[in-house]
Image (spheres, rainbow, N blue to C red):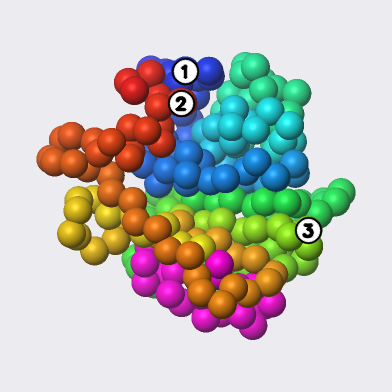
Amino acid sequence: MASIFRFKQFDVDQTDCAMKINTDGVLLASLLDIANATRILDIGTGTGVIALMLAQNNEYSEIEAVEIDPLAAAMAEKNFRNSIFRDRLSLHNCSFQELIIREHFDLMVSNPPFYTDSLHNPDQRKRLARHTDMTFFLALLDFAATNLSGRGKLVLIIPTALAEALRLISVEKGLYCTNEILISSFVGEPPIRKIVTFERAPKGVVDIQQFVIYAAKGVYSESYKQALAPYFLAF
């Protein structure tokens, strides 16, 4: 049976995707400021939802997406083709390391696999989608350092502990954390995710913002509804 998520300006068929649309991905896409990003790369696009949301957000952007899972890549390509943004979206069924770069990117985004050092899922497709080792992130930082434009940004949504580790490692690659959005489920609770921005030029002080998903159990916060209102039919 088809599994289709309907947005205000596009639909996402996620029938054959190992990882379905999730809160992490839609928050990453909705909280990004991409006004100055013309060339964008979505790494591990899955259903293609992040790329589609970014295409809606900036009508002048050209977005490339990479996805290593053949079935997910085929579905993302279908979602791109069926959208009104089709002329500005392209899909590559490969790893980001295999991507042929035509010119530098202004922005790279990823909702990456992050269960490092955990037991791997016996389902190979879910293993690819959900699990990775630190070598993935080292390669990602190297890739960004090589292929970002001078003022380009790499933005990831990841668990807090992993964010702290990458902040230290990124400096060795010539990339510096300049902004963090700390995402908590409820007010007063510790963050469960961080949206972390890396750039070539360091800042004296990292910009830190707070974001809360729920106002109460089962009730989304006004911040969440405001962020997703341009995209979600429910808001």
Q: State the extent of the magenta-drawn residues as a range.
A: 159-178
Which quadrant would the C terminus be assigned to in this image?
top left
Return the disc, 1 or 2, that comes first in the chain's sequence. Answer: 1
Q: Which residue is mark 3?
A: 149
- Would residue 71 be visible to someone looking at this image? no
Return the disc, 3 or 2, that comes first in the chain's sequence. Answer: 3
Judging depth in this view, the residue of 10 and 71 nearest the camera is 10
Residue 44 position in % (x across, y down): 57, 48
Judged by its main secondary structure, the magenta piece is helix
**Left or right: 143 as drawn, with respect to 111:** right
Say if the magenta span includes residue 161.
yes
Q: Residue at x 18, y 34 (%)?
A: 219
Q: Residue at x 49, y 24 (%)?
A: 12
Helix, strand or loop status at disc 1? loop
Q: CA distance from mark 1 to mark 2?
A: 5 Å
Q: Amino acid at mark 2?
A: Tyr
- Would residue 219 be visible to someone looking at this image? yes
Judging depth in this view, the residue of 168 and 80 nearest the camera is 168
Q: Which residue is mark 1?
A: 8
Return the disc, 1 or 3, that comes first in the chain's sequence. Answer: 1
Residue 114 position in % (x across, y down): 43, 61
Q: Residue at x 59, y 65 (%)?
A: 198
Q: CA distance from mark 1 to mark 3?
A: 32 Å
Judging depth in this view, the residue of 110 and 96 nearest the camera is 110
Residue found at the far left of this picture: 217
Q: Which residue is mark 2?
A: 231
Which quadrant would the N terminus be assigned to in this image?
top left
